Image (cartoon, rainbow, N blue to C red):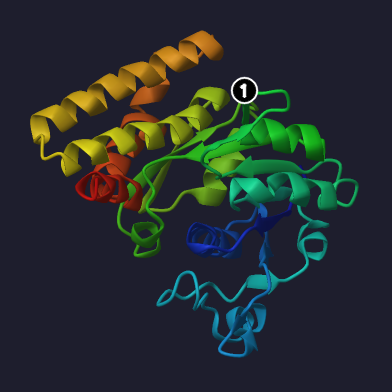
Amino acid sequence: MPTKNKVCIVGSGNWGSAIAKIVGQNCAKLPNFDERVTMYVYEELVNGKKLTEIINETHENVKYLPGHKLPANVVAIPDVVTAAREADILIFVVPHQFVRSLCATLLGKIKPTAVALSLIKGFDQAEGGGIDLISHIITRHLKVPCHVLMGANLAGEVADEKFCETTIGCRDKRLAPLLRDLIQTDYFRVVVVDDEDAVEICGALKNIVACGAGFVDGMNLGDNTKAAVIRLGLMEMIRFVDVFYPGSKLSTFFESCGVADLVTTCYGTFLSKINKQNVLYI
């Protein structure tokens, strides 16, 4: 890796903007990173003005993370190739359905030595059926190694600088400390493990368990039943990884990407609440 690593954030929703706040602050003060951070922003009009112009002038993503200032060294760019072409580290934080098209646009137009970090939770459908991990799609379509970050990280709370933890899955022992330093703050604690697939799968499967937790709430079955659903859901997550992605470590499920994210999603997210409402309207 170069002495001054350049960072690009591919995505600018609420989670992408919350991470941009952290990354911008760290790149401004740490010697291993170039101060300027580019952020790919899908261009939209907000009250008749381009969103990129608003972000660059006011240092605030007024549409997706209002009320939170971004560091002045975070530069919003509406063209993904322009944003990413000089980056050494690409942080992907876009809806999963756009990953393939973005990779196709970027292929051959970024540094061949670049690495990616995916913050995208969920699965995609593999060609011919089955599931495909987002990090695998990025690696396969962009021809660069892709690592993952998952955890109990509600974007609004992270932006408010409320303490939380996250998990980075990275097998590259040389790169792992660099990714940790890029993301970690005094309120955002990072633990790095080498169990990449398990970290990413936890970020997807916990949503299924949260649907069950929401159903329990909607049926008014109580906290004991909800706790049982969460515990059984965690056991199913462990079993799923053991069967389909063997070789993972049990300890990974007790990091933020596992049990912590599972609890947060089952209690404090839109997903669990909407499934509660689904039951109430049946």
Residue 266, by quadrant, is: top left
Residue 115, by quadrant, is: top right
Helix, strand or loop at label 1? It is loop
Disc 1 packing (10 Å; few <14; some 14–19; many ≥20): few
In the picture shown, does residue 94 fall above or below 196? below
Which residue in the structure is indicated by mark 1? Answer: 130
Q: Does residue 115 appear to the left or right of 133 in the view shown?
A: right
The residue at 47%/49% (across/down) is 184
The residue at 50%/59% (across/down) is 22
Q: Residue furthest bottom?
A: 48
Location of residue 259 in the rendering, given as x and y in whole percent from the top left corner = 31, 30
Location of residue 59 in the rendering, given as x and y in whole percent from the top left corner = 55, 79
| Residue 194 visible to an observer of this rendering | no
What's under tag 1, amino acid-wise? Gly
The C terminus appears in which quarter of the rendering?
top left
| Residue 229 visible to an observer of this rendering | yes
Location of residue 111 in the rendering, given as x and y in whole percent from the top left corner = 85, 48
